[in-house]
Structures are given as C-alpha cells and as structure tokens.
Image (spheres, rainbow, N blue to C red):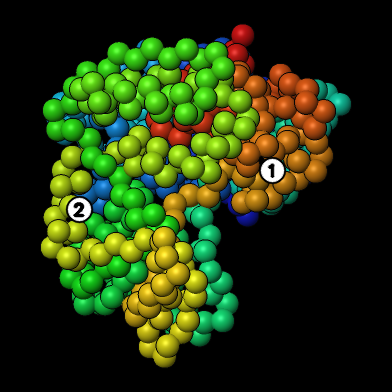
Amino acid sequence: MINASCGQSWNKRLIYDVVVVGSGFSAIAVVCNLVRKLPQTASVAVIGDDPGFGRGTAYRTEMHLHRLNVPAARMSLFMDRPADFIEWLSRKDRPSRDADFASRSDYGLYVRDTLANLLRRNNERCRVDFIKAKAAGCVERYSGTLGFLLEHGGEIAGRHVVLCLGLGNAKLPVDIEGLGATMRSHVIENPWRLSWLTRVGPLDRVCILGSGLTMIDQVLALRSHGHRGRIDVLSRRGLVPHGHARDPKPPAAIEIDARGITLSRMLHGFRQQIRSGTNWRSLMDALRPKTQVLWQDLAPSERSRFLRHALPWWNIHRHRLAPAIHDEFDKLRQQGVVNFHSGYLKTLSDAGDEFCIEYRRRGSQETIALSVDWIVNCTGMERAGLVHSPLLQEMRRQGLVVADPLGLGISVDRASRTLNSTGTVQSNLYAVGALTAGQFWEITAVPDIRAQAEQVAAQIAM
C-alpha cells in the first residue's frame, strides 16, 4: 500500500481502475465496498489530505458525550451485516443494545478498524493505494480515463471515478473583517476545532449562532470543560431538535400515493394521522425508508417550496437527539444556563473587550442588544454546493459536472452517475454522499450513505 506524502514529487501518471476522491465517511464506505467486490487484479487509489481518513468531522471528536443520533443497530457499514457495529462494540468491551446511542468517537474507531481489517487481507483483495494529497485539477484523457492533477505534482487517473467530497462549515452570517485582532480571535468560525474551548473563561458569556445539533454538541462540550457562564443561542426561528423516545414504538403504517403528490397533501395526511392517535415519532420513522422516493417524485417547484418553508421543521423532527443528550440539554435550558433568542442578526461590533450583538426579534421590528465575550458559529454545514471545492469548480468549468438546480450539490441520476453540461449521464463518474442531495435529499446519515456506496461499488464491479 502506498501512502504518498504531500512533499513527494511525482513526474508520472498512474492509472487505476477506480479513483476515489475524498477522505471522509463517504469515501471510506465506498472503499470498503470496493475491496469486498472487486477482483484481486483491480486497483484503487484514494486521494485525500485529511489525516483522520474516514472519520470526517462528525466521528473525529474524542468527547464521549458526543453521541450518534441513530441507534447503534442501524450503524453498520454494510447492508448485509446489520449487526457489525454492535458486534464490534461487544469485542471492545463496550456492550450495547440495539436501541442504544453509541459515542461518535467509538464509531470513528469502528470505521477505522473495519477498513484496516479489510486491508490486512493482502492476498485476497484488490490493490488499494492511499495518496495523501489534494486534487488540484482534473482533465479528461483520450484513454477513457479521468486524470486528477495533484497539488504536489504528478497525476492519478482512473477508469472509474467516485467523488466523495463532503461539506464545509457554513460561513458566519455577518462580516468580521472590521473587528480588532483580539476580538477576532474570540470569533469561532469552525467550532469543530475544539482547541478553542480551553481559552474560554469559566464565567465568560458565549453567544452561539444557530440552534441545531452542532449547537447542542458545543454547549455540552463547554460544560465539560468547566464553563459555567451564560450561553445565549440566536437563530432565526429558535427551533431546537427533539429527542428520540426512550422506548420507541414501531414505525407507523402510512400509505402515500406518489402520483402528483404535493407538500400540502402530504402534510394534511400526516396531521390527520396524528390527530387520530399516531405517534409523530413513529410517523417520522415510517417516512425514513420512503423519503428518497418521495423527494424524487416531487416536482421541482415542490422541492423548492420545501426548502423555503418546511426545512427547519423537518430537521428538528427528523434529526433527533439521543434521549440522554436531550435530557441533559433540556436541564440546562430549564436552569437558565442556555437562553434562546429567535431573530435576524443585524450587526456584530467590537465594543472594546466585548462584542455587541444586535438582532431583530422575529415577528417584530424590535431590535435587541446582547453583550458577550465569544461568538461561536454553529449555523451548521453549508449546503452541498460547489463553492467550497476548487476541484468541483474546475470540473464545472470543463463541463464534467453541473450544479444541481436547487444548489444541493451536483446533478446525478438515480444510480449516482453524474451528468455533464449537456445533460448526458457519465457512466464512469459517480458521486456519493452530500453532493447528491439534489437527487436523494436524505443522503447524509450512515444508513443512506452505506446503501449508496454499496450500489456504486456494485456497478463499478460489474
């Protein structure tokens, strides 16, 4: 196995059967499935510069209090081995019931161990080379391959290519260029670089922008680092994720006629079921295996309407918290440690040794001011657009990929094959994970990505 360093200079072009571009969970899921399906004569290159390959942002955390939002029984890397993660936990003396919510750090270790075990079978698998570098450019070759120019020199080409480029952290909703250097150091643009927590004083006032899952992670991380001060949370609607039930009920029985379906008709039907006694969590769980098909059957105008009006409510009901985490956070809220504000951030100014935040209260013209010591950006991950990736922008300029009309990544067909600028399906260029949200919508959780990764690997292996 080659592990090329970033400083190494290559002056030749290497051709592989498959090139996987990316180093997050989507990439590792694809590689694991390729290793299981490709013949020993095949070759795979993985291009990525993240030292925590496969763990990504979500599973790199070392804090045990950061929990998965999906029960352990549904977190296996493989569709045909549903108990794989549960069995790994047992082997590591971390026994878990199917309905338990394991730590994200444990899941990251499971992912790493699973790949390592597959790669140890040297004489029973295809060749896999890990190229530690960024792909700086892309070019089509007459040999029927797609070549990626590496930032340290050289080129890696593939007969099949799988793009597994994840999401970047969403940008702050205000400009901070005018702030002084000291105060700018108290603006945390990427909260997942957890070293900032050690700089926060025990009684410092913290304002978190955004009220989703990332906010809850950071609140609990602050508390675990000894912070006991006030935390203000500002978001447009002040909505907070719900928790999973401790004793979940089976998914509800729902029947949806997808022909000519609209959001209004679906919502009307769901409300009728809940009024008739159906548990809303059971309803959401029943929707889970149907979501991708329902999304694909919605007209483009209905998809756009969903993103404009329904998305915040979908997120807090669909992406729920582990019960213990929800209870711990709710206690902080009831104690007044965490205070919620719903409104639109207007200004962020430097008031000497503190920030002055002004926001317009939702539903009124009233302006509220807050004085705080820290600003933490928890507005979530950006939508899966092309802005965060110079490589994708270059591929778009060449007509190799096109942006999804709703700004949800790149256009792919139902088999995850990319479309070029003429709308033609490219049989040797795939995308996996968040980049394909325009086609699949629900494609950021492990159960969805593992199914997509297996399908792509099976198509390549045919």
Q: Tell me what residue is drawn at x 46 percent, y 84 percent.
A: 350
Q: Is residue 232 left or right of residue 116?
A: left
Q: Is residue 181 visible?
A: no
Name the foreground residue: 230 vs 425.
230
In the rendered view, would you say 360 is above or below 183? Answer: above
Q: What is the distance, in whole Å, between disc 1 and disc 2 at their CAs?
A: 38 Å
Q: Disc 1 or 2, which lies upstream in sequence?
A: 2
What residue does disc 2 label?
329
What residue does disc 1 label?
392
In the picture as drawn, the residue positioned furthest to the top comes out as 462
Name the foreground residue: 361 vs 45.
361
Q: Tell me what residue is drawn at x 47 percent, y 16 percent.
A: 36
Q: Count all numbered tags in the image, as a single digit.
A: 2
* Amino acid type for the residue under numbered disc 1: Leu
Name the foreground residue: 286 vs 177.
286
Which numbered mark, 1 or 2, is in the foreground of this view?
A: 2
Image x and y of residue 441, in percent: 51, 31
Image x and y of residue 93, in percent: 15, 32
Name the foreground residue: 17 vs 29.
29
Q: Tell me what residue is drawn at x 51 percent, y 15 percent.
A: 258
